[in-house]
Amino acid sequence: AKIHYHGFFIQATPVKRLCKTHNTITVNGMYPGPTLEVNNGDTLVVKVVNRARYNVTIHWHGVRQMRTAWADGPEFVTQCPIRPGHSYTYRFKIQGQEGTLWWHAHSSWLRATVYGALIIRPRPGESYPFPKPKRETPLLLGEWWDANPIDVVRQATRTGATPNVSNAYSINGQPGDLYNCSKKDTIIVPVKSGETNLLRIINSALNQQLFFKIAKHKLTVVGADASYVKPFNTSIIMLGPGQTTDVLITADQPPAKYYIAARAYASAQGAPFDNTTTTAILKYKTTPCPTKCTSTKPVMPSLPAFNDTATATAFTKSLKSPRKVEVPTEIDENLFITVGLGLNNCPHGARRRNCQGPNGTRFTASMNNVSFVLPSNFSLLQAHQKRIPGVFTTDFPANPPKKFDYTGNVSRSLWQPARGTKVYRLKYGARVQIVLQGTSIFTAENHPIHLHGYDFYILAEGFGNFNPKRDTAKFNLINPPLRNTASVPVGGWTVIRFVADNPGIWLMHCHLDVHITWGLAMAFLVENGVGKLQTLEPPPADLPRC
Ligand code: C2O
């Protein structure tokens, strides 16, 4: 196994999009950032040097980080931020994961521009469980703001209102030729007739689930979140932020240009979103070039309506593990966690301009009615390791404070979560089941829930309130998909299971950054087990201090 050394210089770089140039925070001047390519079993050593004027951390989204929680990255959870002028070296090993992951800043909204692909190929000498593709292309779906994303979130936090939506979606950092001033930079994906290519699609957008489609071409899904899936064909895929999907595509159409397109799947009524479409071009190398070459329009796929929940859930339900897997059948910890929005009454004496949510409220979000607050003077992991009291409490509730009709007409009194830094303690090796129950408080919405440090099996999903009597029968205990981010359907639920075999503190949160800003998060504290192999490694010497 190899050790890969990289330097990530976080810096402001002029980037021109949508006719304007902005000083954008990038890694090594690249937007999106560098693609990291490794083999299963390799070690990554990434020195992050902060030359920007913001605090920063980098998270290796989906990497299990076995016993190396110090390298996970969420600020104030596993480390204090890297301050301007400082650096920190992330060191971790890829163990057993193959496929596509990615990395992104985990500090304020910096991940809007600080992100890149992490490609994990099989160990040397081993091959993919599908025919070797001729070519591989990572496609990172993103969002572009004309404003500085940090200002957008600061403004939203100050006013309590919904933050502005982005000005464009993008593919590999480019909005594509349906947007102003973007045509000449549209990403071209070249293909040769008859060849099969592997596309590694990553939803790195901040706040939007996305549909993805390629005109006239069938997609064969072979992986998701760096786990292989049982291959199946589809014309469309849906990804929540944080999720990845690997697809094979065969160039079996008449040589021409075909649009690769992504557009919002905005499950909620009333949730602000942008209805535009980002495109790249799948271009056959032998595309005939009639008289006016530049004017030959690529073929456009028809994308589902923004609220086409049936298409979105049909896709997520098609994902299965390739063969029978070992799902824990006994459960030690059975948690029921509501995920949803809320509205806080304006605190007494607050100014009106700080309460610009509906009817003079402030937007909030919670899990089991706890709106998560990050500490500011320690990271949770440091506080845990050094036994510093007062940084967090271990009373995150295993159930909502009271039962209610989660997806029905929720009484106003339940709209106001309490703020807190609460973690849930798990014994090493505990077999955990979590019912993630969406709520319709304020508005029902789809929540891509991401768990750090783990992959989990998704046993079932459905609409309405989870009903153990009825819904347990639907659990797939044979070949459920293994993922790190689950799309909890709008007005519905998802059930996941995992074994707590990785000690540390692990954030679980909605991967819509606007929701994490409002507190849609919690953390697990997984205790050490017995012996070295079940114990968190000591912190690196250069771990940033707060
Ligand atoms: Cu990809 Cu906590 O995030």
Image (cartoon, rainbow, N blue to C red):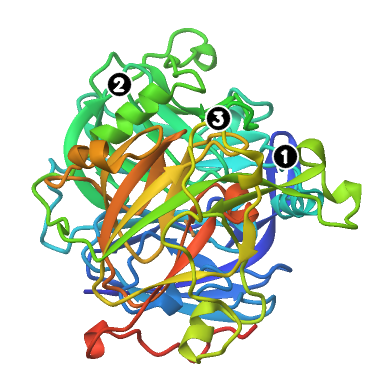
Q: Which residue is the site of mark 1?
A: 164
**In this view of the protein, can residue 133 be seen by the observer?**
no
- Do the numbered discs 1 and 2 sit on residues whose CB atoms are within 8 Å? no
Which residue is drawn at the image coordinates 27% and 34% (left, top)?
A: 317
Quadrant where the N terminus is found in the figure:
bottom left
Residue at the spot x=66%, y=38% of the render? 166
- Relative to 505, say whether 337 is above or below: above
Locate residue 89, reporting x and y percent: 48, 79
Q: Earlier in the sequence, mark 3 or mark 2?
A: 2
Label whose residue precedes the other's in the sequence (1 or 2) = 1
Mark before the other along the chain sequence, 1 or 3: 1
Assess whether mark 2 and mark 3 are in contact (beta carbons under 8 angstroms): no
Quadrant of the drawing holding the C terminus: bottom right
Residue found at x 18% / y 42%: 476
Numbered mark located on residue 217 in the image: 2
> Is residue 92 in view?
yes
Q: Which mark is residue 393?
A: none
Q: Quadrant of residue 182?
A: top right
Looking at the image, is mark 1 or mark 2 nearer the viewer? Answer: 1
Q: Which residue is mark 3?
A: 268
